[in-house]
Image (spheres, rainbow, N blue to C red):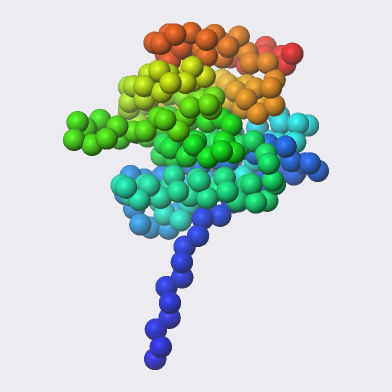
Amino acid sequence: MAQQATPVRTARLGRALGPEPTAVSAVVLLLPGGEETSARRPSPMMASASVRALGRRLTRAGQADGLVTHVVHYRFRGWNGSEAHLARDASWAVDEVVRRYGDVSVCLVGIGMGGRAALRSAGHSAVNSVLALAPWLPEEDVAAPPEPVKQLAGRRVLIVHGTKDERTDPELSFRLAARAKKANRDICRFEVHADGHALHQYRNEVLALAEDFVLGTLFGHAFSRPVEDALAAPPPLGLRMPLAAGFGQSLKRR
């Protein structure tokens, strides 16, 4: 009996979240979390409700400007060392966006391990900006090269991390941001005090901050004053900006 070839796994884009605009001018790619090492196929639940809630909010906010939002479905659950599968799939997804929509700006929005994938894949020419929420980053090792930051040059970058995150070390995202800030002034980082990995306690504030950043980077909307201040402030001030309770409640677009 002839052996059947093992099917090749492929990444894919989920269906657009919400109604797709007639003319697409920008795309948000949502990169869910993952695992450090796993060759298993991701389950549909990896794109959690919080990822989709963020995507739907961004879609509604940017619909008039021509924004479309897709969740990236990975080939594997794990980052898997030097294979960096999640980052490769993120880069494939940007290529797919260009194939589908042409010359549009892309914002990579990643959560947890997806945050690392977003930061690592920012060097693609179509990427305009990166939003990394509670990004998982490897422990620093003198015997291994540090997590790269050169690919962030020319991109606007926002990192958001809870100070009580017990799954992904907020100090590691601060150190990466500090290294990146030396070559890229358009990077800032907000700390969500007393919140954990899922950022549930200040969920509304985090969603409002994400909306403010994404619409500002993709469509030139005016940033809120806290985001302006964080981008302009020298380190460490702009990299330890506290996310105020109630952020976004009175936010009005100018």
Specify the quadrant that holds the N terminus.
bottom left
Expressed as whole percent of the image width and height from the top left, the position of residue 95 reads 58, 48
Residue 53 in view, yes or no: no
The foreground one among 144 and 153 is: 153
- The residue shown at (58%, 25%) is 210
Specify the quadrant that holds the C terminus.
top right
The foreground one among 66 and 184 is: 184
Q: Quadrant of residue 174?
A: top left
Expressed as whole percent of the image width and height from the top left, the position of residue 241 reads 46, 12
Expressed as whole percent of the image width and height from the top left, the position of residue 24 reads 74, 41
Expressed as whole percent of the image width and height from the top left, the position of residue 218 reads 65, 29
Residue 220 in view, yes or no: yes
The foreground one among 44 and 107 is: 107
Q: Is residue 167 above or below residue 9?
A: above
- The residue shown at (37%, 33%) is 148
Q: Is residue 146 above or below residue 247?
A: below
Q: Is residue 234 above or below residue 110?
A: above
Relative to residue 230, is residue 15 drawn left or right? right
- The residue shown at (46%, 70%) is 7
Count every numbered label the image shows and give the total. Answer: 0
Of all residues, the one furthest to the right in this rendering is: 22
Relative to residue 128, is residue 196 drawn left or right? left
Of all residues, the one furthest to the bottom in this rendering is: 1
- The residue shown at (18%, 35%) is 143
Relative to residue 35, is residue 231 drawn left or right? right
Relative to residue 208, is residue 1 drawn left or right? left
Q: Quadrant of residue 56?
A: top right
